[in-house]
Amino acid sequence: MLELNFIRANKERVLQGLKTRNFPDEELHIIEDILRLDDTRKDAKTELDSVLAERNQLSKKIGGLFKEGKKEEADAMRRQVTQLKDRAAELEEQLRLTREALAEQLYKVPNVPHESVPPGSTDEDNEVFKPWPEELPEPGADALPHWELAQKYNIFDLDLGTKITGSGFPLYRGKGARLQRALISFFLDEAVKAGYEEIIPPLLVNEDTARATGQLPDKEAQMYYVERDNLYLIPTAEVPLTNIYRDVILEEKDFPIKLTGYTPCFRREAGSYGAHVRGLNRVHQFDKVEIVQFQHPDKSYDTLYQMLEHVEGVLKKLELPFRILRLCGGDLGFTSALTFDFEVYSAAQQRWLEVSSVSNFETYQSNRMKLRFRDGKSTRLAHTLNGSALALARIVAALLENNQTPDGIVIPKALQSYTGFELLN
RNA sequence: GGAGGAGUGGCAGAGCGGUUGAAUGCACCGGUCUUGAAAACCGGCGUACCGAGAGGUACCGGGGGUUCGAAUCCCUCCUCCUCCGCCA
């Protein structure tokens, strides 16, 4: 969430940011509401503190009087303190309610978009930041979509997944399973080469963790929930990886911290069904290698562009046609200040498939997480960034479709040492 | 899952219900001394909130309670350790 001091000092910028996001005009008063609640909070806190200070003083005196044996004076003072206690309880309750209301409102305010975020309302307004290559590959006349290729080569099976679990849980087999494992290893190796520390995190997380990265309460419906143990299946490795640094105070010399992790990701994604979610285009369980960085506020945008370059490099090694989009205000994630999406072109479907999303959250996540660093005598919130490098299922879809030949699927050179075969047939 | 023990500052480790935000040691930072270093000595050394400041308030695993007053007493939850059971 946004920092109160930031809102107070940059009210116009925050309002402008909300407009960029197409936040409804009639709800813009939320900013004023928040500042007013904060004033109320401060007043209550000030008064409560003075009441408590008085109580503490009297209590000390009472202690002294008892030692001196002045019991009557002490008793009189005790009655006085009892009154103060009632007042303190009232103020505490008021403070608690104000804080709750404040937090509730604050949760409704999205991050302030970076100045480079283009205006717009839907994904059609996203800016093509970088096309690559200039020319799109022409699909062969008889090009098959990946779900048909899957049947042809017996590499994954959605019906079996449905039998075992339910729709949207693919089962990979044979060379398909091997391809999956190869991609994971390849992505992890690339990230480690780029200086990221490899992490294997837990796949279930508790409530505090889900709240810190903003899955709760914003995206509760997106997560699978294990009620008996009050745990959530992670929708992305971002959740456990980022939470490693929850409630941590770093030193400036610790920056940048670079983590990577492979995990399965679980998403309920209740909603749309149809042709564009066929096959691996959208599933409830998929594999992903995530990269996460924690950085000094002055350097986080350099870091963001480095992360873009990393993802770009990996896609080029896979020889997949892709483009980078700068998300417009309307498409930008709630917690992000600036996001670039990577889309690979799926020749047979003649569609772009999103395979990565790289974002700078600035202090939005770190404020919830209390991730700080020492800045002179005080502390400051660090910046958090993350990106997919990369999400498997759609990469597989594009790879199968783009590389199909009459003899089989051609495996990109960079991947061959991982798959152990050059042709999937 | 059952029985017992424990959770205090970066670490170690004190703490009769009252002047303890918390002894002491180590680590760390600054200084004196030294050609330099070590040693020794002196000083500093948690976080958050309120306050222009002085200063105040809160926090001793989390939450609740008793009390004029709780790190210290009670309840509850969590975590860790030991033993038993089960187990990849």
Image (cartoon, coloured by chain):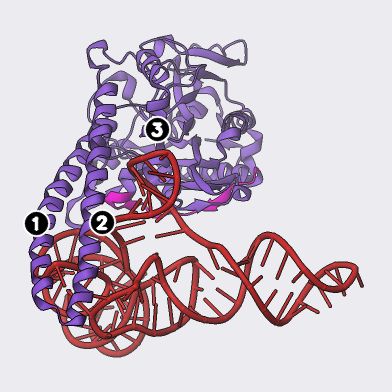
Which numbered disc, 2 or 1, marks the residue that appears first in the sequence?
2
Q: Which residue is mark 2?
A: A53
Residue at mark 1? A83
Q: Nearer the viewer, residue A295 or B31?
A: B31
Q: Are marks 2 and 3 on the same chain?
A: yes
Same chain for labels 1 and 3? Say yes or no: yes
- Residue A77 seen in render: yes
Residue A60 position in % (x across, y down) = 24, 69
Residues marked 2 and 1 touching at CB (< 8 Å): no
Chain where mark 3 sits: A
Q: Position of residue A375 (x, y in %)?
A: 56, 45
Q: Amino acid at mark 2?
A: Ala
Task: Give neighbour class at mark 2: few <14, some 14-19, many 20+ (Cα, 10 Å).
Answer: few
Q: Mark 2 to mark 1: distance in Å?
A: 14 Å
Type of amino acid under label 1: Gln
- Please state which of residues A294 and A315 is positioned toward the viewer in this rendering: A294
Q: Nearer the viewer, mark 2 or mark 3?
A: 2
Residue A106 in picture, x, y percent from top left? 29, 32
A409 to the left or right of A227: right
Which chain wears red? B
Q: Which of the 4 quarters of the picture holds residue B6?
A: bottom left
Crowding at dot 1, Cα within 10 Å, few <14 / some 14-19 / many 20+, comes out as: few
Question: Would residue A2 be visible to someone looking at this image?
Answer: no
Mark 3 sits on what residue? A5
Q: Nearer the viewer, residue A229 or A397?
A: A229
Q: Which residues are magenta?
A: A194-208
Element marked by disc 1: helix
